[in-house]
Image: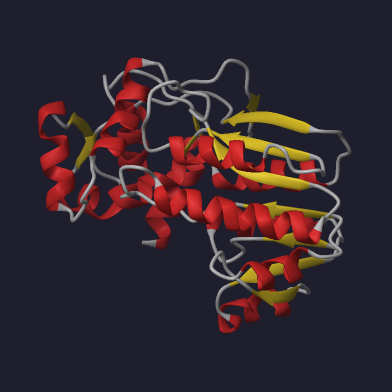
Amino acid sequence: MYSVMGATGKVGGAVAASLLKAGLPVTAIVRDAAKGAAWVQRGATIAVADLENEAALARAFAGAAGVFVMLPPLFDPAPDFAESKRMSTSLRNALASARPGKVVCLSTIGADAKEANLLSQLALLEETLGDLPMPVAFLRAAWFLENAAWDVAPVRATGILASHLQPLDKKFPMVATADIGGLAAQLLQEDWAGRRVVELEGPRRFSPNEIAAAFGAALGRTVRAEAVARETWEDQFRAQGMRNPTPRARMLDGFNEGWIDFAEARKGTTGLADVIGALVQSD
C-alpha cells in the first residue's frame, strides 16, 4: 500500500492517479473525508489526517510500502519560518513513529540556495527529514507551470502577462505538476538506501515571452508579457495582504539572478502549450 498526502491537490493527485493506473493500492490522505469521496470511487481508500495531528498522520503512514509527503504551500511565512518548522517536525515525528518502507518528499529547486528566500522552507524540511531511518528521496521540482493559473483572468481581461520573472526573454526551469506526480510515483516503486535527491524540470525551459505567446494561442488573441518593476514588488505584495513579503521577493530575485537553478535535472514530457491550454479551458 502507498500513502499519498495532498491527494486533493495537483501534485498529490497526480501521484495517487499514477499509482492507481499502475494497479497499486493507494491510501489518499485528506483533511476532509468528504473531499476523499472521489478517490474512493477511483479505487483508493482514504485516511483523514493533517499536520496538526501527528497520531492520525502516523496511522495513515503505518504499514505503507512507501509514502508521498509534502508541506502545504505557505506564501507569507513568519520571518523565522516558524510555521514550516512546526509542520516539518510534526511530519518527521509521524514518519519516525509509523516507519513506512520509504518516503518520497516533495521539495523544490532552490532547496540548496545559500540565501534565505521563500523556498528555504523546504530546505528546512529536507534537513528535518534527512536523518530518518528509512530511505528518503527529496524530489526537487522546478517552478510549477500551473502557477500560471493566477494569470488566466488578468490575461484574458487585458492581454498583458504581468511577469515578476525577468528579463522577459530569459528561459526559466519549469515543470508540469503531472510530470512531478508521475516521477514521484515512479520513485515510490524504486529501491534505494539512505538519502537521495532527484531534480526535475520540463522538457525544455520557458521564458515569460513564451508563456505570453502560449496564452495568446490558447485565447485566440494577442498577449504580451510586461515586466513588473522590482522596486514595486514588496508594496504590491503587501497590498495583496502579505505581512512578510521579503522571502517571496528574494525567491524571485534568485530565479532572475540565477542563484536558484538546477545543476543536473531529469526532464519531464509535458509542454507549455498543454498546460496553458488546460488552464484556459478550466477557468
Q: Position of residue 220 (x, y in %)?
A: 30, 46
Task: Indicate left or right for 174 with 193 as reference.
Answer: left
Give whichever of 178, 90 is nearer the camera: 90
Q: Residue at x 63, y 67 (%)?
A: 54
Instruction: State the residue lying farthest toward the bottom.
Output: 34
Splitting the image into 4 quarters, where does residue 50 fall?
bottom right
Q: Residue at x 78, y 41 (%)?
A: 187
Q: Position of residue 49 (x, y in %)?
A: 62, 72
Q: Is residue 128 placed above or below 262 in the rendered structure?
A: below
Q: Residue at x 46, y 50 (%)?
A: 84
Give whichever of 132, 66 is nearer the camera: 132
Q: Is residue 170 placed above or below 206 in the rendered structure?
A: above
Q: Position of residue 223 (x, y in %)?
A: 23, 38
Q: Which quadrant is home to the C terminus? A: bottom left
Splitting the image into 4 quarters, where does residue 259 fall?
top left
Q: Is residue 18 visible?
A: no
Q: Is residue 221 placed above or below 69 in the rendered structure?
A: above
Task: Indicate left or right for 168 with 218 as reference.
Answer: left
Q: Residue at x 12, y 51 (%)?
A: 239
